[in-house]
Amino acid sequence: MNIIVTGGAGFIGSNFIFHMLKEHPDYRIVCLDKLTYAGNLSTLQPVMDNPNFRFVKLDICDREGVYKLFEEEHPDMVVNFAAESHVDRSIENPEIFLNTNIIGTATLMDACRKYGIKRYHQVSTDEVYGDLPLDRPDLFFTEETPIHTSSPYSSSKAGADLLVLAYHRTYGLPVTISRCSNNYGPYHFPEKLIPLMIINCLHDKPLPVYGEGLNVRDWLYVEDHCRAIDLIIHNGRVGEVYNVGGHNEMKNIDIVKLICKALDKPESLITHVTDRKGHDMRYAIDPTKIHNELGWLPETKFADGIKKTIQWYLDNESWWQPIISGEYQNYYEEMYGNR
Ligand code: NAD
Ligand code: DAU
Protein backbone atom coordinates (compact mmCIF):
# COMPACT_ATOMS: atom_id res chain seq x y z
CA MET A 1 0.00 0.00 0.00
CA ASN A 2 1.33 3.41 -1.01
CA ILE A 3 -0.32 6.36 0.74
CA ILE A 4 0.16 10.06 0.06
CA VAL A 5 -0.37 11.98 3.29
CA THR A 6 -0.74 15.71 2.69
CA GLY A 7 0.00 18.20 5.48
CA GLY A 8 2.12 15.58 7.24
CA ALA A 9 4.54 18.17 8.64
CA GLY A 10 1.74 19.66 10.73
CA PHE A 11 0.22 18.58 14.04
CA ILE A 12 -2.21 15.77 13.23
CA GLY A 13 -0.62 14.73 9.92
CA SER A 14 2.75 14.06 11.58
CA ASN A 15 1.13 12.05 14.37
CA PHE A 16 -0.73 10.09 11.67
CA ILE A 17 2.51 9.34 9.79
CA PHE A 18 4.13 8.04 13.00
CA HIS A 19 1.03 5.95 13.68
CA MET A 20 0.92 4.45 10.16
CA LEU A 21 4.64 3.62 9.96
CA LYS A 22 4.34 1.88 13.33
CA GLU A 23 1.08 0.02 12.72
CA HIS A 24 1.71 -0.83 9.04
CA PRO A 25 5.48 -1.20 8.69
CA ASP A 26 5.12 -2.58 5.15
CA TYR A 27 3.26 0.51 3.85
CA ARG A 28 4.99 3.28 1.92
CA ILE A 29 4.07 6.75 3.19
CA VAL A 30 4.75 9.80 1.03
CA CYS A 31 4.32 13.09 2.85
CA LEU A 32 3.38 16.04 0.64
CA ASP A 33 3.62 19.36 2.48
CA LYS A 34 4.13 22.98 1.46
CA LEU A 35 5.86 23.75 4.78
CA THR A 36 3.82 26.83 5.62
CA TYR A 37 4.38 28.52 9.00
CA ALA A 38 2.54 25.51 10.51
CA GLY A 39 4.65 22.85 8.83
CA ASN A 40 7.84 21.80 10.55
CA LEU A 41 10.30 19.43 8.95
CA SER A 42 12.07 18.82 12.26
CA THR A 43 8.89 17.06 13.44
CA LEU A 44 9.45 14.37 10.81
CA GLN A 45 13.14 13.90 11.62
CA PRO A 46 12.54 10.56 13.42
CA VAL A 47 11.21 8.97 10.20
CA MET A 48 13.32 10.73 7.55
CA ASP A 49 15.68 7.74 7.25
CA ASN A 50 12.89 5.16 7.12
CA PRO A 51 13.11 3.55 3.64
CA ASN A 52 9.29 3.40 3.53
CA PHE A 53 8.99 7.16 3.97
CA ARG A 54 9.46 10.01 1.51
CA PHE A 55 9.01 13.74 2.06
CA VAL A 56 8.09 16.03 -0.85
CA LYS A 57 7.82 19.81 -0.43
CA LEU A 58 4.82 20.74 -2.56
CA ASP A 59 1.70 22.91 -2.54
CA ILE A 60 -1.56 20.92 -2.97
CA CYS A 61 -2.74 23.74 -5.27
CA ASP A 62 0.22 23.11 -7.63
CA ARG A 63 -1.56 20.99 -10.23
CA GLU A 64 1.53 20.21 -12.30
CA GLY A 65 3.55 19.22 -9.24
CA VAL A 66 0.74 17.10 -7.81
CA TYR A 67 0.22 15.25 -11.13
CA LYS A 68 3.96 14.62 -11.41
CA LEU A 69 4.00 13.14 -7.91
CA PHE A 70 1.10 10.83 -8.79
CA GLU A 71 2.97 9.68 -11.93
CA GLU A 72 6.02 8.89 -9.80
CA GLU A 73 4.25 7.26 -6.86
CA HIS A 74 1.05 5.63 -8.20
CA PRO A 75 -0.58 6.04 -4.76
CA ASP A 76 -3.30 3.64 -3.61
CA MET A 77 -4.73 6.23 -1.22
CA VAL A 78 -4.56 9.92 -0.41
CA VAL A 79 -5.25 11.21 3.08
CA ASN A 80 -5.65 14.98 2.96
CA PHE A 81 -4.67 16.80 6.14
CA ALA A 82 -3.18 19.81 4.32
CA ALA A 83 -5.09 22.92 5.28
CA GLU A 84 -4.91 26.34 6.76
CA SER A 85 -6.24 25.33 10.15
CA HIS A 86 -6.41 28.33 12.51
CA VAL A 87 -9.76 30.10 12.91
CA ASP A 88 -8.23 33.40 14.12
CA ARG A 89 -5.98 33.62 11.06
CA SER A 90 -8.97 32.96 8.79
CA ILE A 91 -10.75 35.95 10.32
CA GLU A 92 -7.74 38.16 9.49
CA ASN A 93 -7.10 36.77 6.00
CA PRO A 94 -9.69 34.42 4.47
CA GLU A 95 -8.18 34.14 0.97
CA ILE A 96 -5.42 31.62 1.65
CA PHE A 97 -8.04 29.44 3.39
CA LEU A 98 -10.15 29.35 0.23
CA ASN A 99 -7.14 28.55 -1.93
CA THR A 100 -5.62 25.78 0.12
CA ASN A 101 -8.71 24.27 1.70
CA ILE A 102 -11.00 24.33 -1.35
CA ILE A 103 -8.88 24.66 -4.52
CA GLY A 104 -6.18 22.41 -3.05
CA THR A 105 -8.74 19.71 -2.23
CA ALA A 106 -10.15 19.87 -5.78
CA THR A 107 -6.65 19.66 -7.26
CA LEU A 108 -5.84 16.54 -5.24
CA MET A 109 -9.12 14.91 -6.24
CA ASP A 110 -8.54 15.78 -9.91
CA ALA A 111 -5.24 13.92 -9.67
CA CYS A 112 -7.06 10.98 -8.07
CA ARG A 113 -9.55 10.94 -10.96
CA LYS A 114 -6.83 11.19 -13.60
CA TYR A 115 -4.55 8.50 -12.23
CA GLY A 116 -7.04 6.30 -10.35
CA ILE A 117 -7.15 5.72 -6.60
CA LYS A 118 -8.54 3.16 -4.15
CA ARG A 119 -9.48 5.78 -1.58
CA TYR A 120 -9.41 9.57 -1.16
CA HIS A 121 -9.90 10.53 2.49
CA GLN A 122 -10.72 14.10 3.51
CA VAL A 123 -9.79 15.11 7.06
CA SER A 124 -12.56 17.51 7.98
CA THR A 125 -13.78 19.06 11.19
CA ASP A 126 -16.79 19.27 13.51
CA GLU A 127 -16.72 23.04 12.87
CA VAL A 128 -18.63 22.49 9.61
CA TYR A 129 -21.74 21.93 11.77
CA GLY A 130 -21.50 25.38 13.37
CA ASP A 131 -22.14 25.46 17.10
CA LEU A 132 -24.60 24.25 19.72
CA PRO A 133 -26.18 26.31 22.51
CA LEU A 134 -24.71 26.02 26.00
CA ASP A 135 -28.14 25.47 27.55
CA ARG A 136 -28.92 22.35 25.47
CA PRO A 137 -26.43 19.71 26.70
CA ASP A 138 -28.72 17.06 25.18
CA LEU A 139 -27.79 18.16 21.62
CA PHE A 140 -24.86 16.65 19.68
CA PHE A 141 -23.56 16.83 16.10
CA THR A 142 -24.45 13.73 14.11
CA GLU A 143 -23.49 13.10 10.48
CA GLU A 144 -27.02 14.29 9.58
CA THR A 145 -26.64 17.69 11.28
CA PRO A 146 -26.89 20.37 8.58
CA ILE A 147 -23.74 22.24 7.56
CA HIS A 148 -23.94 25.69 9.17
CA THR A 149 -20.59 27.42 9.38
CA SER A 150 -19.39 30.45 11.34
CA SER A 151 -15.85 31.40 10.26
CA PRO A 152 -14.01 31.64 6.95
CA TYR A 153 -12.03 28.60 8.14
CA SER A 154 -15.06 26.42 8.79
CA SER A 155 -16.73 27.65 5.60
CA SER A 156 -13.69 26.68 3.56
CA LYS A 157 -13.66 23.22 5.19
CA ALA A 158 -17.39 22.84 4.52
CA GLY A 159 -16.87 23.89 0.89
CA ALA A 160 -14.21 21.20 0.57
CA ASP A 161 -16.52 18.57 2.12
CA LEU A 162 -19.28 19.41 -0.36
CA LEU A 163 -16.82 19.10 -3.24
CA VAL A 164 -15.60 15.73 -1.95
CA LEU A 165 -19.17 14.39 -1.84
CA ALA A 166 -19.84 15.90 -5.29
CA TYR A 167 -16.77 14.15 -6.75
CA HIS A 168 -18.11 10.90 -5.35
CA ARG A 169 -21.57 11.37 -6.83
CA THR A 170 -20.50 12.88 -10.16
CA TYR A 171 -17.31 10.97 -10.92
CA GLY A 172 -17.66 7.95 -8.63
CA LEU A 173 -14.47 8.89 -6.77
CA PRO A 174 -14.10 6.49 -3.79
CA VAL A 175 -14.09 9.03 -0.97
CA THR A 176 -14.58 9.11 2.79
CA ILE A 177 -14.72 12.09 5.15
CA SER A 178 -13.98 12.29 8.88
CA ARG A 179 -15.21 15.20 10.99
CA CYS A 180 -13.31 15.31 14.24
CA SER A 181 -13.52 17.49 17.33
CA ASN A 182 -10.59 19.43 18.85
CA ASN A 183 -7.37 17.44 19.02
CA TYR A 184 -4.56 17.90 21.53
CA GLY A 185 -1.19 16.22 22.02
CA PRO A 186 2.46 16.41 20.87
CA TYR A 187 3.52 18.72 18.00
CA HIS A 188 0.46 20.98 18.38
CA PHE A 189 1.38 24.39 16.96
CA PRO A 190 1.65 26.98 19.77
CA GLU A 191 -0.99 29.31 18.28
CA LYS A 192 -3.72 26.88 19.47
CA LEU A 193 -5.32 27.06 22.94
CA ILE A 194 -3.62 24.22 24.83
CA PRO A 195 0.01 24.63 23.67
CA LEU A 196 -0.29 28.43 23.82
CA MET A 197 -1.41 28.29 27.44
CA ILE A 198 1.29 25.75 28.40
CA ILE A 199 4.07 27.81 26.82
CA ASN A 200 2.79 31.13 28.21
CA CYS A 201 2.57 29.54 31.67
CA LEU A 202 6.16 28.37 31.38
CA HIS A 203 7.17 31.99 30.63
CA ASP A 204 4.87 33.47 33.32
CA LYS A 205 3.13 35.40 30.55
CA PRO A 206 -0.57 36.44 30.61
CA LEU A 207 -2.99 33.69 29.54
CA PRO A 208 -5.36 35.33 27.02
CA VAL A 209 -8.80 33.77 27.46
CA TYR A 210 -11.30 34.98 24.84
CA GLY A 211 -14.38 36.54 26.47
CA GLU A 212 -15.56 34.76 29.60
CA GLY A 213 -13.94 31.48 28.58
CA LEU A 214 -17.28 29.66 28.77
CA ASN A 215 -17.06 28.24 25.24
CA VAL A 216 -17.03 24.46 25.18
CA ARG A 217 -14.82 22.22 23.05
CA ASP A 218 -14.85 18.40 22.84
CA TRP A 219 -11.18 17.39 23.28
CA LEU A 220 -9.70 14.21 21.79
CA TYR A 221 -6.12 12.95 22.14
CA VAL A 222 -4.51 13.09 18.70
CA GLU A 223 -3.56 9.39 18.63
CA ASP A 224 -7.26 8.46 18.99
CA HIS A 225 -8.02 10.58 15.91
CA CYS A 226 -5.20 8.86 13.98
CA ARG A 227 -6.59 5.42 14.86
CA ALA A 228 -10.04 6.53 13.69
CA ILE A 229 -8.69 7.61 10.28
CA ASP A 230 -6.71 4.37 9.96
CA LEU A 231 -9.97 2.43 10.52
CA ILE A 232 -11.99 4.59 8.12
CA ILE A 233 -9.55 4.34 5.20
CA HIS A 234 -9.42 0.55 5.56
CA ASN A 235 -12.96 -0.36 6.61
CA GLY A 236 -15.14 2.73 6.21
CA ARG A 237 -17.87 2.74 3.57
CA VAL A 238 -17.15 4.74 0.43
CA GLY A 239 -19.18 7.96 0.14
CA GLU A 240 -19.72 8.15 3.90
CA VAL A 241 -18.99 10.77 6.55
CA TYR A 242 -17.79 9.65 10.01
CA ASN A 243 -17.86 11.90 13.07
CA VAL A 244 -14.98 11.42 15.51
CA GLY A 245 -15.09 12.63 19.11
CA GLY A 246 -14.75 11.33 22.63
CA HIS A 247 -17.58 12.93 24.66
CA ASN A 248 -15.04 15.04 26.48
CA GLU A 249 -16.56 18.50 26.64
CA MET A 250 -14.75 21.17 28.61
CA LYS A 251 -15.02 24.93 29.05
CA ASN A 252 -11.95 26.86 27.90
CA ILE A 253 -11.54 28.51 31.29
CA ASP A 254 -11.44 25.11 33.02
CA ILE A 255 -8.72 23.89 30.64
CA VAL A 256 -6.63 26.99 31.34
CA LYS A 257 -7.07 26.62 35.11
CA LEU A 258 -6.11 22.95 34.87
CA ILE A 259 -2.91 23.86 32.98
CA CYS A 260 -2.06 26.52 35.63
CA LYS A 261 -2.51 23.93 38.37
CA ALA A 262 -0.45 21.28 36.59
CA LEU A 263 2.42 23.73 36.11
CA ASP A 264 2.04 25.25 39.58
CA LYS A 265 1.32 28.72 38.20
CA PRO A 266 -1.13 31.26 39.68
CA GLU A 267 -4.54 31.72 38.08
CA SER A 268 -3.85 35.46 38.26
CA LEU A 269 -1.99 34.97 34.95
CA ILE A 270 -5.41 34.53 33.32
CA THR A 271 -6.38 37.65 31.34
CA HIS A 272 -9.80 37.94 29.72
CA VAL A 273 -9.36 39.52 26.29
CA THR A 274 -11.74 40.64 23.52
CA ASP A 275 -13.72 37.71 22.23
CA ARG A 276 -13.10 36.03 18.84
CA LYS A 277 -15.50 37.39 16.17
CA GLY A 278 -18.32 34.92 15.48
CA HIS A 279 -16.99 32.68 18.28
CA ASP A 280 -18.69 29.25 18.28
CA MET A 281 -20.15 28.44 21.73
CA ARG A 282 -20.12 24.66 21.93
CA TYR A 283 -18.95 21.71 19.88
CA ALA A 284 -20.07 18.19 20.82
CA ILE A 285 -19.72 15.12 18.63
CA ASP A 286 -21.96 12.08 18.61
CA PRO A 287 -19.54 9.28 17.57
CA THR A 288 -22.16 6.50 17.49
CA LYS A 289 -21.71 5.75 13.78
CA ILE A 290 -17.94 5.14 13.88
CA HIS A 291 -18.37 3.11 17.06
CA ASN A 292 -21.15 0.91 15.67
CA GLU A 293 -19.68 0.43 12.18
CA LEU A 294 -15.95 0.33 12.86
CA GLY A 295 -15.68 -0.43 16.58
CA TRP A 296 -13.78 2.79 17.28
CA LEU A 297 -13.62 4.15 20.81
CA PRO A 298 -11.24 6.72 22.28
CA GLU A 299 -8.52 5.10 24.39
CA THR A 300 -6.89 8.07 26.14
CA LYS A 301 -8.78 9.73 28.98
CA PHE A 302 -8.41 13.52 29.11
CA ALA A 303 -6.77 13.41 32.56
CA ASP A 304 -3.99 11.17 31.17
CA GLY A 305 -3.76 12.84 27.77
CA ILE A 306 -3.32 16.34 29.15
CA LYS A 307 -0.67 15.12 31.60
CA LYS A 308 1.24 13.45 28.74
CA THR A 309 0.85 16.58 26.60
CA ILE A 310 2.12 18.97 29.27
CA GLN A 311 5.07 16.64 29.93
CA TRP A 312 5.79 16.53 26.18
CA TYR A 313 6.04 20.34 26.03
CA LEU A 314 8.28 20.32 29.11
CA ASP A 315 10.56 17.71 27.51
CA ASN A 316 10.58 19.18 23.98
CA GLU A 317 11.45 22.82 24.34
CA SER A 318 13.88 22.29 21.46
CA TRP A 319 10.84 21.72 19.21
CA TRP A 320 8.78 24.78 20.21
CA GLN A 321 11.47 27.31 21.13
CA PRO A 322 12.58 27.93 17.50
CA ILE A 323 8.91 28.32 16.51
CA ILE A 324 8.07 30.94 19.10
CA SER A 325 11.25 32.92 18.52
CA GLY A 326 10.64 33.38 14.78
CA GLU A 327 7.73 34.86 12.79
CA TYR A 328 5.39 33.70 15.56
CA GLN A 329 6.41 36.74 17.63
CA ASN A 330 4.96 39.10 15.00
CA TYR A 331 1.81 36.97 14.82
CA TYR A 332 1.46 37.07 18.59
CA GLU A 333 1.91 40.83 18.75
CA GLU A 334 -0.67 41.39 15.98
CA MET A 335 -3.20 38.95 17.43
CA TYR A 336 -2.88 39.79 21.12
CA GLY A 337 -1.04 43.16 21.28
CA ASN A 338 -4.11 45.42 21.51
CA ARG A 339 -6.72 42.92 22.54
P1 NAD B 1 -1.69 22.26 11.10
O1 NAD B 1 -1.97 23.69 10.81
O2 NAD B 1 -0.92 21.90 12.31
O3 NAD B 1 -0.94 21.61 9.84
C1 NAD B 1 -1.31 21.86 8.53
C2 NAD B 1 -0.22 21.32 7.62
O4 NAD B 1 -0.63 21.51 6.27
C3 NAD B 1 1.13 22.03 7.77
O5 NAD B 1 2.18 21.07 7.77
C4 NAD B 1 1.22 22.91 6.53
O6 NAD B 1 2.55 23.15 6.09
C5 NAD B 1 0.45 22.07 5.52
N1 NAD B 1 -0.13 22.89 4.44
C6 NAD B 1 -0.84 24.04 4.56
N2 NAD B 1 -1.16 24.50 3.33
C7 NAD B 1 -0.67 23.61 2.43
C8 NAD B 1 -0.70 23.53 1.02
N3 NAD B 1 -1.29 24.49 0.28
N4 NAD B 1 -0.11 22.48 0.42
C9 NAD B 1 0.51 21.52 1.15
N5 NAD B 1 0.58 21.56 2.49
C10 NAD B 1 0.00 22.60 3.13
O7 NAD B 1 -3.12 21.56 11.08
P2 NAD B 1 -3.67 20.36 11.99
O8 NAD B 1 -4.19 20.90 13.27
O9 NAD B 1 -2.69 19.25 12.00
O10 NAD B 1 -4.95 19.93 11.12
C11 NAD B 1 -4.81 18.98 10.07
C12 NAD B 1 -6.16 18.78 9.41
O11 NAD B 1 -7.10 18.31 10.38
C13 NAD B 1 -6.76 20.06 8.83
O12 NAD B 1 -7.38 19.73 7.62
C14 NAD B 1 -7.79 20.50 9.86
O13 NAD B 1 -8.84 21.20 9.24
C15 NAD B 1 -8.24 19.17 10.40
N6 NAD B 1 -8.72 19.14 11.80
C16 NAD B 1 -7.96 19.67 12.80
C17 NAD B 1 -8.40 19.56 14.12
C18 NAD B 1 -7.57 20.10 15.27
O14 NAD B 1 -8.05 20.09 16.40
N7 NAD B 1 -6.34 20.57 15.06
C19 NAD B 1 -9.61 18.93 14.41
C20 NAD B 1 -10.36 18.42 13.34
C21 NAD B 1 -9.90 18.51 12.05
O1 DAU C 1 -13.08 21.58 16.41
C1 DAU C 1 -12.04 21.28 15.54
C2 DAU C 1 -11.22 22.52 15.29
O2 DAU C 1 -10.48 22.77 16.49
C3 DAU C 1 -10.28 22.38 14.10
O3 DAU C 1 -11.04 22.25 12.93
C4 DAU C 1 -9.35 23.60 13.98
O4 DAU C 1 -8.42 23.40 12.94
C5 DAU C 1 -8.61 23.76 15.30
O5 DAU C 1 -7.80 24.91 15.24
C6 DAU C 1 -9.60 23.87 16.46
O6 DAU C 1 -10.37 25.10 16.38
P1 DAU C 1 -10.70 25.98 17.67
O7 DAU C 1 -10.99 27.34 17.22
O8 DAU C 1 -11.70 25.30 18.52
O9 DAU C 1 -9.27 25.87 18.43
P2 DAU C 1 -8.37 26.97 19.16
O10 DAU C 1 -7.26 26.23 19.84
O11 DAU C 1 -8.01 28.10 18.28
O12 DAU C 1 -9.35 27.53 20.28
C7 DAU C 1 -9.97 26.68 21.22
C8 DAU C 1 -10.89 27.55 22.08
O13 DAU C 1 -10.07 28.39 22.90
C9 DAU C 1 -11.77 28.47 21.29
O14 DAU C 1 -13.02 28.59 21.96
C10 DAU C 1 -11.05 29.81 21.34
C11 DAU C 1 -10.34 29.77 22.67
N1 DAU C 1 -9.04 30.49 22.74
C12 DAU C 1 -8.10 30.20 21.80
C13 DAU C 1 -6.87 30.84 21.82
C14 DAU C 1 -5.83 30.53 20.76
C15 DAU C 1 -8.77 31.39 23.76
O15 DAU C 1 -9.63 31.63 24.63
N2 DAU C 1 -7.56 32.02 23.78
C16 DAU C 1 -6.60 31.79 22.85
O16 DAU C 1 -5.53 32.43 22.92
Image (cartoon, rainbow, N blue to C red):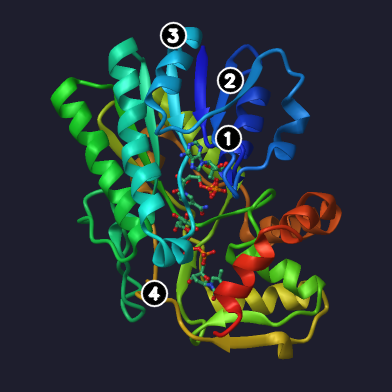
Query: Residue shown at 29%/23% (left/top)?
Result: 110
Residue 134 percent across, percent down from the top left: 36, 79
Which residue is disc 4 drawn over? 279
Earlier along the polypeptide chain: callout 3 or callout 2? 2
Instruction: Identify the mark at residue 29; answer none if there is no mark.
Output: 2
For discs 4 and 3, the disc positioned in front in the rendered view: 3
Instruction: Identify the mark at residue 8; answer none if there is no mark.
Output: 1
Query: Residue shown at 59%/78% (left/top)?
Result: 336
Q: Regarding mark 3 in the picture, which secondary structure is present there?
A: helix
Q: Type of residue at label 4?
A: His
**Distance CA(mark 4)–CA(mark 3):** 43 Å
**Residues under numbered marks 3 and 1 in contact, where contact means CB atoms less than 8 Å apart:** no
Q: Type of residue at label 2?
A: Ile
Q: Regarding mark 2 in the picture, which secondary structure is present there?
A: strand
Earlier along the polypeptide chain: callout 3 or callout 1? 1
Which residue is disc 3 drawn over? 71
